[in-house]
Amino acid sequence: MHSFNAFPLVVRFPLAAGLNALGPKGAQKVTHPDTGDVTIACEGFNQKNHYDREAPCDQDFLRKLAKDTEADALMRWFSADVAEVFKSQRALDKEGIFIGDASYLFVPDNPNYEGSVKLLFDDNDHPVSEEAYKKMTDEQKTRCQWRRCYKMVSLLHTNRTMEFFFFVALKVLPGNAHESPVLYELVRQFVETVGKGVMKRLILDRGFLDGTSISTCKKDYDIDVLIPVRRNMDIYQDAMALFQLPDIAWICLKEPLAEAKESLRPTQLHAFF
């Protein structure tokens, strides 16, 4: 589904691809007179093709275009220009829920994969540090293996009912690169591209725990960051101490009504540890 062969499917999904942005000459919805099936008809951008097509250009053209484009420039285009298309086509949900993530992309053990590195992983595909490896039993060590990989840091957009998921920004790095500063740079770039108020809640895991960056998201971009903490962290102990104060009043937070979702702001929600 993530290969170039999926391109016609992406074009047929208006919310993700912005079908209307292509214009009537680029792509049109066509209803079959006998079956009633709805398909996509595209004329293309040249006079060379005279057969029916379901995408404005061939997936092989996209592959060659991506290969011939400098990698950083391709990722900047996706994280900026494409984000503007999402906004112009009103594909960004008004609740502004985004998810930051970092994933390993495994490739064959071939040094021709530029920028890739080899790391030691356990049988659950979690990286193993040298210190953790020394503490393992012999049986656990036998299940570890060296794998060549990249790391992809991404911003994913969804809504409360999780009806859709699509990427609005990404960056591919060597597998041993630190993902936290890259993620917050993607957030800054996204806000500068589409403006404040679009991203309202950013859900992250503990790998992105950075006090300065989280404060910047709140103070400069008006983004509430939701991130889990461990019980042995100072911020958890501080929160539990505050909860013991006599003037703390506890309330029950209920699911907002559908008609109230539009006006509900993140500052009206309460954070629970």
Image: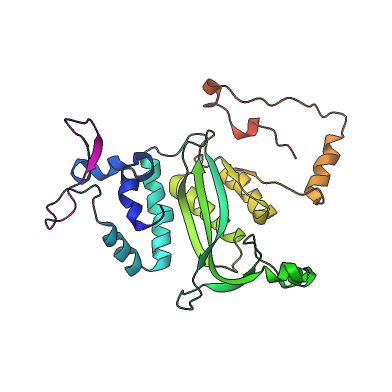
Q: Residue at x 56, y 58 (%)?
A: 103
| Figure check: 174 above or below 182 | below
Q: Please tell me which residue lies in front, 61 or 251.
A: 61
Q: Please tell me which residue lies in front, 148 or 214.
A: 148
Image location (x, y in percent) of residue 12: 31, 42
Q: Please tell me which residue lies in front, 190 or 251.
A: 251
Relative placement, left or right, of 202 versus 84 is right
Magenta span includes 133: no
Magenta span includes 50: yes
| Figure check: 195 above or below 110 | above
Relative placement, left or right, of 234 versus 179 is right
Image location (x, y in percent) of residue 207: 66, 56
Which residue is farthest bottom? 111
Image location (x, y in percent) of residue 83: 41, 48
Q: Residue at x 17, y 48 (%)?
A: 52
Image location (x, y in percent) of residue 192: 47, 50
Looking at the rendering, the stretch of residues picked out in magenta corresponds to: 31-51
Q: Please tell me which residue lies in front, 156 or 58.
A: 58
Q: Which secondary structure type mostly characterizes the magenta part of the structure?
A: loop
How many numbered marks have been drawn onto this rendered protein structure? 0
| Figure check: 73 above or below 191 | below
Q: Residue at x 25, y 49 (%)?
A: 55
Relative placement, left or right, of 219 versus 250 is left
